[in-house]
């Protein structure tokens, strides 16, 4: 098992560098960032531009800049912001925002798995029943509604018409408005709506995946064989079938989590949620390349870690992988 | 004449249909057969003739969209079709066990063989985990697996085809069933392994005093193992008799055609015969005798009415309107 | 004489089976597809949106003008007979904008899907057929594109391009191109898997034995046998591309000159409290069109997948 994990880690390293190169090229494809940032500023002189370029080390050849970036990355340094909070260190900046993003995305991921797996199983077990038709129709619809649209509708209904939840943000502005005076409860209260929307959006494809995977497994001979051995329906479904049905689901969870993190700009913009996603939108609007690079690298690392955890879970579930 | 042994299983008019969206597939349509105590019945027919569905119906584990819609399955004097699901769970694996065609797919890939055996043993017998493990190792010796203490912890993907089938047999035998349903247990194995497995099953059957239904499309396989043979075609039984009778005095044209399709050392220059056409579409099967479109001897009577399974000679049942005419008149095979 | 009779019977039997032997796969698929109500609904939805796109200037009650857009004089009027979906804060008729948005959505959907699927098919076929080192390298690249935070890169690219050329040159085409270039990876993997499956089949072995060239095997034998998968994936890809474009426009990184549903939602998001109608209707149309392509894709999969066929 340990050897398997190490092999997976080694395997992820070139992936990381590949992505790093693409991100780096993406941020430099239009040339000198200083030029870009100042293009609409009529007051700046060529001399000032030159000074800024040298200050940020942008006068060196591109590959040289890349190696400097790499070297700093390995020391845990992502550089300083061009435009935000007076050139604050990008790591500090991400540290300030990341937790809120994680809180929201992880809560949604866990909730959606918690709901999707049993719902998918029951739906598959009762294929073509009314329940199954309802579940599959709702899920299919769930995959078609854009998250931000779902968010807007939820805000209109639950925040404005019903007034149950705040429309956005992570905290009330005034501490007097905290429910029961508790900061934590206030945050949970603010989290409820975005978490619910994100959970539903993530839930839908997982339900469909669990269902189809379960249907596939239930057709297998070993399920018939388990039934033929007189095992209880519970053992057949929840032990023999489920373990096999989860294999494709597990392989997708890592990718889903990556997609959720990458989609953070959208969800966080709708709910005005102060996480790295909204920070990213702000940085991109201001062409703040160190922050853009930093957040992308950060989300990439998180995605790769999620994939690694997925791989380990996969190896745990499927002995064919473990003993390969 | 000695008293004939009592039958352990008697199926009457079993009808199992599949409700697909292409139509109702009449996979098993009025099958009757019986297995006597200690006997091996060979259930023979082309693929798609409904042999497996018959066997799955006995355990009531026909997969969706299949449903048993009529008939009786009398096992030890009780109709299995009237039992509740939880009563059936106690019969499956304990009283009646099943061996599947493909050992590669009939063992769960994510659990070790020990896990799978222990679960079945503990399901039907009141023993601890350790005792169940010992029993499992014992079973491995029974099916002649070397190093059972080590091999038992393997996962299915680590084993060869023949080994997997031995394990599947061990699982089927784990609770000493009275009746074993073996569904083409050797078809997916190498020829040399096939002979070993058949030999093993024959010995085990004798040792444990079981009855067995051996399902196969291969006349060569049943010849050496079965006491009696029922030939199935397109969801119906067309002929049932002792093995010798079937081989030396087959009365149904389909049985004859099947036998002529088996290669034989005695045949010198004769060409192997094939049965023209294919098994019919069971959504709208041919009227009357389902074999008539492929039969060399079919007449108008064969098209209009379903021939009943009649006892032509003692212990020799044939479902063919012209069976009496053929009796003795057809040139015998050898 | 006996023989004669039996052949006659055989013929009669053949006639009973109404299905002639020469029915092609596509014919069978079409029959199955026609029976699938959900898929037909999907096709109907797509047809409806295409109709809107084709005759947008005839259907929309208020024509688009460069400035001030769809200005109709009254801002934030709730839905009424005069303004079917109400008006937004700039006084645009929301219904007219929704109608004009149909063309953008279809343009991005079809365009991005065409680009993404061309890349996916190319990578999938080459990787699956050649195997070995080629396969290895291509699959590593595919994995990079699978794991990469695609939306982030997309936003950066779009922002940089508009910063370089503020008088954006065909902004919607750039959005389409970018979505296409970044969304081929998962489809390439699926197609590769199918190619591997087909490659193992005996008829490929046979044509190899007959000395067919590699290119001939790929295009004459393998490609037709994975075509059904490609059709299904393309349909689903269109749906995905429409969703991605909507998200990009919603964040304000889309083509500011184009009329898109996502852009309408961006403006609506500023004032959901005051004017719910601004966002509800364009969002409904995104959902509807995406649903249409997903239903169609699922229906096509059921109709074309030979493994589901009896």
Image (tube, helix red, strand yellow):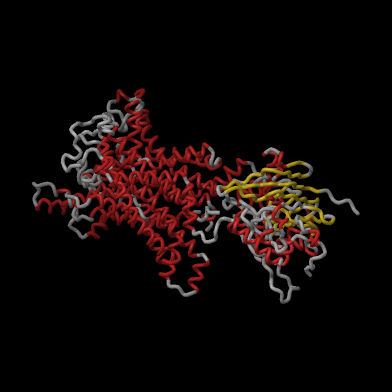
Q: Does residue A162 lie above or below B239 as drawn?
A: above
Q: Going by the image, does A282 lie left or right of B18? A: left
Residue B193 image offset from top left, x and y in percent = 68, 64
Report the front residue among C266 and A103. Answer: C266
Q: Is residue A302 left or right of residue B309?
A: left
Query: Residue C91 at x, y = what percent?
Result: 20, 34
Can residue A304 be seen here? The reply is no
In front here: B174 or B94?
B94
In the displayed structure, does residue C248 sit left or right of residue A260? left
- Position in image of residue A124 (x %, y %): 53, 43
Q: Residue at x 68, y 66 (%)?
A: C4
- Res C13 visible: yes
Which of the 4 image quadrants contains residue B298?
Answer: bottom right
Quadrant showing the C terminus of chain B? bottom right
Q: Residue B251 appears in which quarter of the rendering?
A: bottom right
On screen, A60 above or below A138? below
């Amino acid at each position: 098992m340990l050897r398997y994990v190490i092999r997976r880690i080694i395997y992820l390293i070139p992936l990381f560098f590949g992505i790093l190169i693409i991100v780096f090229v993406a941020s430099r494809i239009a040339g000198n960032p200083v030029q870009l940032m100042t293009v609409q500023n009529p007051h700046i002189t060529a001399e000032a531009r030159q000074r800024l370029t040298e200050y940020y080390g942008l006068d060196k050849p591109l590959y040289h800049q890349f190696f400097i970036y790499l070297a700093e990355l390995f020391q845990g340094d992502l550089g300083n912001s061009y435009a935000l909070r007076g050139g604050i260190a990008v790591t500090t900046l991400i540290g300030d925002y990341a937790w809120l993003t994680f809180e929201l995305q992880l809560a949604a991921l866990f909730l959606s798995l918690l709901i999707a797996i049993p719902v998918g199983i029951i739906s598959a077990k009762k294929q073509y029943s009314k329940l199954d038709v309802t579940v599959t129709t709702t899920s299919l619809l769930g995959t078609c509604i854009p998250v931000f649209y779902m968010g807007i509708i939820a805000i209109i209904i639950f925040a404005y018409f019903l007034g149950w939840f705040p429309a956005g943000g992570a905290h009330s502005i005034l501490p007097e408005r905290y429910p029961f005076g508790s900061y934590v409860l206030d945050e949970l209260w603010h989290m409820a709506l975005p978490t619910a929307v994100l959970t539903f959006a993530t839930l839908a494809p997982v339900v469909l995946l669990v269902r189809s995977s379960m249907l596939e497994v239930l057709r297998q001979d070993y399920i018939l064989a388990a039934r033929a051995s007189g095992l209880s329906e519970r053992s057949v479904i929840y032990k023999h079938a489920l373990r096999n049905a989860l294999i494709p689901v597990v392989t997708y969870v890592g990718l889903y989590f990556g997609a959720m993190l990458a989609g953070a700009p959208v969800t966080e913009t709708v709910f005005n949620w102060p996480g790295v996603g909204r920070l990213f939108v702000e940085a991109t609007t201001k062409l703040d390349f160190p922050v853009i690079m930093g957040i992308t690298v950060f989300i990439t690392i998180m995605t790769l870690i999620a994939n690694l955890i997925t791989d380990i879970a996969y190896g745990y579930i499927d002995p064919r992988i473990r003993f390969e | 004449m000695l008293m004939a042994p009592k039958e352990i299983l008697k199926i009457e008019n079993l009808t199992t249909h599949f409700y697909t969206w292409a139509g109702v597939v009449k996979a098993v349509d009025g099958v009757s057969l019986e297995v006597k105590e200690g006997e091996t019945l060979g259930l023979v027919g082309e693929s798609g003739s409904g042999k497996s569905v018959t066997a799955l119906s006995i355990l009531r584990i026909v997969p969706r969209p299949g449903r048993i819609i009529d008939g009786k399955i009398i096992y030890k004097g009780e109709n299995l079709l009237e039992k509740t699901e939880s009563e059936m769970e106690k019969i499956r694996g304990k009283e009646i066990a099943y061996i599947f065609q493909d050992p590669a797919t009939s063992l769960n890939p994510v659990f070790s063989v020990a896990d799978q055996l222990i679960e079945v043993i503990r399901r039907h017998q009141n023993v601890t985990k350790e005792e169940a493990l010992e029993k499992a190792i014992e079973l491995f010796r029974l099916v002649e697996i070397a190093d059972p203490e080590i091999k038992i912890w393997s996962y299915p993907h680590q084993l060869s085809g023949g080994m997997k089938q031995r394990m599947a047999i061990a699982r089927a035998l784990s609770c000493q069933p009275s009746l074993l349903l073996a569904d083409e247990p050797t078809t997916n194995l190498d020829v040399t392994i096939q002979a070993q497995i058949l030999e093993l099953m024959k010995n085990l059957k004798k040792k444990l005093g079981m009855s067995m239904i051996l399902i196969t499309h291969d006349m060569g396989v049943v010849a050496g193992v079965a006491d009696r043979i029922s030939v199935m075609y397109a969801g119906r039984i067309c002929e049932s008799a002792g093995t010798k009778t079937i081989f030396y005095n087959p009365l149904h044209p389909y049985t004859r055609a099947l036998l002529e399709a088996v290669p034989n050392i005695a045949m010198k220059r004769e060409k192997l015969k094939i049965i023209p056409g294919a098994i019919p579409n069971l959504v709208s099967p041919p009227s009357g005798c389902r074999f008539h479109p492929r039969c060399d001897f079919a007449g108008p009577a064969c098209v209009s009415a379903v021939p009943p399974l009649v006892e032509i000679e003692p212990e020799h049942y044939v479902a063919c309107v012209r069976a009496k005419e053929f009796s003795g008149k057809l040139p015998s095979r050898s | 004489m006996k023989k004669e009779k039996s052949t006659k019977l055989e013929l009669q039997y053949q006639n009973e089976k109404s299905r002639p032997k020469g029915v092609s796969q596509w014919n069978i698929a079409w029959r199955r597809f026609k029976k699938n109500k959900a898929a037909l609904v999907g096709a109907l939805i797509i047809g409806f949106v295409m109709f809107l796109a084709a005759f947008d200037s005839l259907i929309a009650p208020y024509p688009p003008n460069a400035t001030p857009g769809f200005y109709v004089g009254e801002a934030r009027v709730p839905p009424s007979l005069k303004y079917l979906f109400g008006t937004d804060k700039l006084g645009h008729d929301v219904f007219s904008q929704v109608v004009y948005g149909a063309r953008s959505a279809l343009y991005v959907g079809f365009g991005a899907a065409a680009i993404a699927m061309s890349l996916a098919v190319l990578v999938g076929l080459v990787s699956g057929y050649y195997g070995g080192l080629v396969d290895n390298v291509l699959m590593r690249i595919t994995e990079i594109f699978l794991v990469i935070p695609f939306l982030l890169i997309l936003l950066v690219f779009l922002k940089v391009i508009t910063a370089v050329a503020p008088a954006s040159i065909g902004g919607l085409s750039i959005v389409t191109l970018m979505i296409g270039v970044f969304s081929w990876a998962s489809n390439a993997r699926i197609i590769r898997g199918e190619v591997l499956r087909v490659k193992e089949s005996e008829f490929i072995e046979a044509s190899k034995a007959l000395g067919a060239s590699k290119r001939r095997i790929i295009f004459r034998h393998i490609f037709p046998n994975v075509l059904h998968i490609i059709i299904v994936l393309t349909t689903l890809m269109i749906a995905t591309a429409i969703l991605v474009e909507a998200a990009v426009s919603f964040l304000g990184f889309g083509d500011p000159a184009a009329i898109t549903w996502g852009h309408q939602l961006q403006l609506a998001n500023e004032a959901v409290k005051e004017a719910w109608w601004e966002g509800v209707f364009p969002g409904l149309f995104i959902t509807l069109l995406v649903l249409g392509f997903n239903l169609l894709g699922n229906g096509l999969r059921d109709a074309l997948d030979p493994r589901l066929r009896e």
